[in-house]
Image (tube, helix red, strand yellow):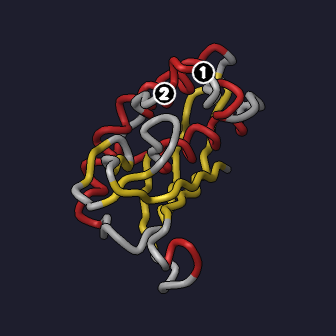
């Protein structure tokens, strides 16, 4: 299981699931702050007992400043492969009041599938709100949860 959260701020692009979304605010982070991809990376790394995203791609290293999270996901998949694992499937839930994500989910899956060497049918992405409660409800940030099944080759 993986989890990530980032604050929404003005002056940043909003990246979710590897695609840029039109929104007046973006997520603040050392990288592009794509919470959906970061949650997937943490789920994959944890399932393979490879620690977490911060261990492999620390926010203290300049090489990861403003990095495209798709690069981090690809590197994560390579780490799994080196340890003898392949991805079975991924299930992600994104918590955001806005933007509404339903119309973007197919494009996200199409973007992520080749990076993880799976089909779009192996990726489930769902979106929910927090019914205006908490930091998500106040539109201060976006979070994502991911669960994965990996298999030893």
Foreground pick, 95 / 106: 95
Mark 1: which secondary structure? loop
- How many angstroms separate mark 2 from mark 1 (CA)? 7 Å
Question: Residue 79 at x, y = what percent?
Answer: 61, 19
Foreground pick, 9 / 126: 9
Foreground pick, 36 / 61: 61
Q: Find the residue positioned furthest to the front.
A: 11
**Quadrant in which the C terminus is drawn:** top right
Q: Does 70 appear above or below 19?
A: above
Residue labelled with disc 2: 65
Q: Quadrant of residue 85?
A: top right
The structure residue drawn at horizontal position 62% and vertical position 37%, both measured from the top left corner, is 44
How many circles with numbers are drawn on the protein?
Answer: 2
Residue labelled with disc 1: 61
Q: Does 5 appear above or below 138?
A: above
Foreground pick, 112 / 59: 59
Name the disc covering residue 132, or none. none
Q: Quadrant of residue 83?
A: top right
The structure residue drawn at horizontal position 38% and vertical position 46%, both measured from the top left corner, is 17
Q: Residues within 10 Å of mark 1 (few under 14, many from 20)?
A: few
Q: Does 104 appear above or below 111?
A: below
Question: Residue 136 at x, y = what percent?
Answer: 51, 72
Q: Quadrant of residue 70?
A: top left
The structure residue drawn at horizontal position 35% and vertical position 70%, both measured from the top left corner, is 98
Question: Residue 38 at x, y = what percent?
Answer: 54, 42
Q: Find the residue positioned furthest to the top.
A: 82
The structure residue drawn at horizontal position 23% and vertical position 63%, both measured from the top left corner, is 103
Mark 2: which secondary structure? loop
Q: Are marks 2 and 1 in contact (CB under 8 Å)?
A: yes
Question: Residue 132 at x, y = what percent?
Answer: 48, 85
Left or right relative to 25: residue 134: right
């Amino acid at each position: 299981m993986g989890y990530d959260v980032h604050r929404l701020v003005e002056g940043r692009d909003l990246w979710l699931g590897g695609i840029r979304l039109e929104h007046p605010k973006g997520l603040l982070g050392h990288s592009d702050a794509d919470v959906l991809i970061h949650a997937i990376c943490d789920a994959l790394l944890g399932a393979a007992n490879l620690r977490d995203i911060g261990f492999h791609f620390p926010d203290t290293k300049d090489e990861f400043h403003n990095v495209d999270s798709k690069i981090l996901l690809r590197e994560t998949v390579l780490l799994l492969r080196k340890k003898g694992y392949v991805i079975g499937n991924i299930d992600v839930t994104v918590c955001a009041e806005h933007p509404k994500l339903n119309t973007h989910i197919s494009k996200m899956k199409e973007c992520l599938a080749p990076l993880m060497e799976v089909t779009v049918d192996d990726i489930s992405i769902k979106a929910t709100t927090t019914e205006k409660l908490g930091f998500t409800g106040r539109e201060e940030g976006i979070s994502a949860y991911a669960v994965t099944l990996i298999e030893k080759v």
